[in-house]
Structures are given as structure tokens and as C-alpha cells.
Image (cartoon, rainbow, N blue to C red):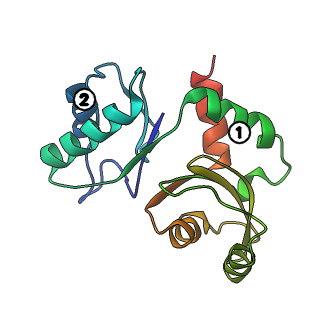
Amino acid sequence: MAFMRNVNQGQRGHPSTADILAGFADAGCPGARTFQSNGTIVFESDEPARVVELAEEAIGVRSGVERDIRWIGLAELITVVDAHGSTPDARRMEFTLHGGGPIDVRSPEIVALTSEHHCSVVDTGPGWAVVRNDVDGEGHATPVLERLTGRRATSRGLPTVIRIVARFGE
């Protein structure tokens, strides 16, 4: 599973669906599929990190638009949904992939930053975090995680991640 950062397929200045799928095909995954139009790509590979690296480069060459891509295994995504998918406030939750290391949610720096941005980090794993926003309709996970890790991040709403798992997790 791959999440491209800052993509709205079909919009000017963004990679097209054709460019994304061709980039993954160039990277050795001709069976890759997009999910919604937000740069979410489902693919299978024994070397997902390498595929994402090659696809990121190929998409940039094909489209003239460079975007970061992060990936997570579907099994790990299923575990996240199992842990948080039935949360009553799932619409306020975001799942974020980032390029940083572990996050200590009790760290005073993290508590201060999330408080300032009206959110809280509720769960973390290697390269990912689940963030709860205090206000409906607001999304703070990407900027907060980018600031905490010093690396680019990309988020999807938890309801979107639940739909991904429902569709591809079986």
C-alpha cells in the first residue's frame, strides 16, 4: 500500500492516474491499482521499499511533477484498523505515514505541539501515527508529523483507511 503526498489525481499540477500506474509498472508492479483520487496505490511486491523508490522517480519523469511516496504493508494497516476502526470519533482521526523514527507520545515537545494544533497522537508505529483532531473537519496530522520528524508525511482520514482495508484486506 502506498500513499503519495499532496496528490489530487486529475487536477492540474498533479500526476495523472495514468502516470501513477505507469510509474508503478515501470517499477515492476504492472498490477498496481489506485484507490480514490488521492494518490493511494495498492500494489504487491516482495521489495516494496524499492518499488516505491523507483515508482516515485518514474512518476516524476513521466508527469514532470515530483511527489513523495510512503508505503505500509496491508497486514500492518489491517492491524491499525482493527485497533482504531471502531472508534466512535473515527471521522476525526487521521492515519499518517512519515519518514521519521519512533515517536514518544508522552514527550513534552510532542504534547505541546499537538496541543497547539488541537490534536493528539493516539498511536504510533514504525513510520506511522494515528492522530485525533479536536475539531470536526480539521486535519492537523501531516503538518504536526512533519514538524516532529523533520521529514515529509502524508495522511488519510481513518474512514478512508477503513474503506481500503474493507476492499483489499481480504
Task: Say which amino acid is labelled 1.
Answer: Val
- Relative to 145, does residue 4 appear above or below in the rendering? above
**Residue located farthest toward the right when viewing the structure as drawn:** 88
Quarter-of-image position of residue 11: bottom left
Badge 1 is on which residue? 80
Instruction: Give the x, y percent position of residue 52.
Output: 34, 37
Badge 2 is on which residue? 27
Instruction: Give the x, y percent position of residue 12.
Output: 24, 58
Determine if residue 46 is in view.
yes
Determine if residue 94 is in view.
no
Task: Say which amino acid is labelled 2.
Answer: Ala
Quarter-of-image position of residue 167: top right
Tell me the residue at 74%/71% (across/down). 107
Instruction: Give the x, y percent position of residue 91.
Output: 72, 54
Local secondary structure at mark 1? helix
Local secondary structure at mark 2? loop
64 relative position to 6: left or right: left
